[in-house]
Image (spheres, rainbow, N blue to C red):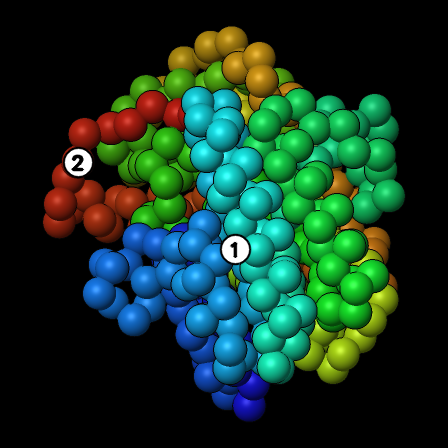
Amino acid sequence: MRRILVTGASGLIGSALVPLLASRGHRVTATDRTFPADDPRHLDVRSPRQVSAALRSVDGIVHLAAVSRVVWGEKNPRECWRTNVTALRHLLSAALDAPTKPWVLFASSREVYGDAPHLPAREDTPFAPLNVYGRAKVAGESLIEEARAAGLTAGTVRLSNVYGRIDDHADRVVPAFCRGAARASVLRVEGETNTFDFTHVDDAVRGILLMTERLARGEPDLPPIHLVTGRGTTLGELAAMAVNASPHSATAYLAPHRTFDVARFIGDPTRAAEVLGWKAEISVLQGVRRLVRAFSALGRVTPRPALSDRKPC
């Protein structure tokens, strides 16, 4: 049994990862800034004092807490940098000073690659971030490498358009499309030919679990790994999948894509297969059908107004 701290545990990935870790016999401390201040699970990663206290008796940390949306980073770049970079610097310093010297797994993003010139992108594809969020993740990865050089066992997982639950951010593209399809709404497609490598949350947390096991064994040279399917899906194709899975008559509306967004990304899953023995098991079509069904069931109980799509992050 290991004592594992998960930051950002209320998010899409954290809420799926915590029970998975617990099912493997680990003692998991799930923390998030969204918990009330008097809740022992409350942790504001921007507070060095709170972080140092939380790290005193843990064996490992999965650091998911972040300003997690591209659009949020564009709207408030200072807060994005404070949360995603400065807070990580404090966390790594606290980990190096902690009695248990816990390992750290940092959640990065395919946004570090920007619009890669060659697809599918490999983990050694040069960084070329297009936005504040992507640049903050590049800086975070650099801090991880500095901490490794200082003696900390640490690693980086790069995530790509993770989806799969109805309680995800309402304006992310997959839940927005699936909710709209379930409620016979018009789906707003911002960039019909924009192409992404969508990863189901169940696949993502399974890969994260495998990486934590490597770090827990003290593996010093675990390379950055992106968890990707290796298959691209355009937003137009994604919308069609949602519409076809709908029990109603949903339609799609085409709109221009946002200028600060990556337009195309497909990743190469070879390293994840070779290092972790991992591969994605849930196709986008399967995941979309599941999510449309889930929203349809929810709608029968508590119908809500339809929401328009925003580009994934």
> Label 2 amino acid?
Arg
Q: Is residue 304 above or below residue 210?
A: above
For image coordinates 74% across by 82% down, the residue present is 217
Q: CA distance from mark 2 to mark 1?
A: 29 Å
Residue 126 vs residue 20, the one in the foreground: 126
Give how far across and how far down residue 12 sits, in percent: 43, 53
Disc 1: CA contacts within 10 A as few (<14), some (14-19) or many (>=20): many
Q: Would residue 222 appear left or right of 66 to someone viewing this image? A: right
- Vertical side of 114 occupied by 270: above or below: below
Q: Is residue 258 above or below residue 104?
A: above
| In this picture, residue 182 sits left or right of residue 229 | left
Labelled disc at residue 87: none
Q: Quadrant of residue 134?
A: top right
Residue 48 position within the rendered picture, expressed as x and y whole percent measured from the top left: 48, 58
Residue 75 point in image, percent of width and height: 44, 23
Q: Residue at x 57, y 59 (%)?
A: 91
Seen as rendered, the residue at the extreme top is: 256
Q: Which residue is mark 1?
A: 64
Closer to the camera in the image, 238 or 87 = 87
Residue 51 in view here: yes
Q: Is there a contact, CB below 8 Å, between mark 2 and mark 1?
A: no
Give the image location of residue 164, x and y in percent.
45, 50
Query: Who comes first in sequence, dot 2 or dot 1?
Result: 1
Q: Nearer the viewer, residue 264 or 151?
A: 151
Screen quadrant of the N terminus:
bottom right
State the residue at coordinates (49%, 30%): 78
Q: State the residue position of label 2.
A: 304
Residue type at mark 1?
Leu
